[in-house]
Image: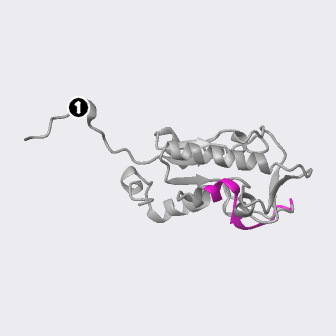
Amino acid sequence: MMPPQRSSSHIRTHLPPKILVSACLIGKRCSFKGNHHLDPAIRSLFDSGRAIAACPEELGGLGTPRQTSEIVGGDGSRVLAGKARVITRSQRDVTRQFVKGARMTLAIARDNKVRLAIFKTKSPSCGCGRIYDGTFSSRSKPGCGVTATLLLDRGIFVLNELDWERARRVSHRTFTDKHLKSYGK
């Protein structure tokens, strides 16, 4: 017996997974100073529908502009373990807002089947590879922010915008859907 034919409304086309990007990288004025860090290549991914954007700090309830914050006593993994805090320059503890924003960003990533994130370097939320050292002296140290750590722990590949740009330059071409289909496999 032949299986029943499906109507064309049941045909699914393969859509590559979305990329999650820091909202400031697409030009949203959501940095702590109320500025953006526009990256034209990342904005192009967003404009083409390949990327979605989020600001974990705003999602966690922190307004824009806001006081600068840094992780004191470790990195994102220690914050998530309850062993480090996120503190503003005036010593206000904003750990709860950073963890809430990280969880909300993870929910957005899961809802959109995200497997790659491109985040802003050095941020206490999004930093991947380097974060500020907790002394408010503009010095950085190796580590990841709260949101980057949570996403990495859940199997989402995270790059900072500098590593993304290096990868684009090395490849001598803009990443296309063909190139992006293979990430995260």
- Residue type highlighted by circle 1: Ser
Name the foreground residue: 167 vs 52: 52
The residue that label 1 is drawn on is 8
Quarter in which the N terminus is drawn: top left
Q: Residue at x 70, y 53 (%)?
A: 125
Q: Is residue 8 above or below residue 60?
A: above
The answer to whether residue 63 of the structure is visible from this angle is: yes
Is residue 38 at all visible to an observer of this figure?
no
Residue at the farthest front position: 1
Provide residue 37's location: percent of width, then percent of height.
Answer: 67, 47
Q: Dot 1 surroundings within 10 Å: few (below 14), some, or many (20 or more)?
A: few
Q: Residue furthest right?
A: 90
Q: At numbered mark 1, what does the secondary structure look like: helix, strand or loop? A: helix
Magenta stretch: give its range: 136-150
Horizontal and vertical percent position of residue 105: 62, 45
Front one among 107 and 38: 107
Residue name at image x 51 percent, y 63 percent: 167
Residue 132 in percent (x, y) is at: 77, 61
Residue 182 painted magenta: no
Could you say where residue 15 lies in the image, as x and y percent from the top left?
Answer: 37, 44
Q: Relative to residue 22, is residue 134 drawn left or right?
A: right
Q: Residue furthest bottom?
A: 142
Q: Residue at x 53, y 57 (%)?
A: 156
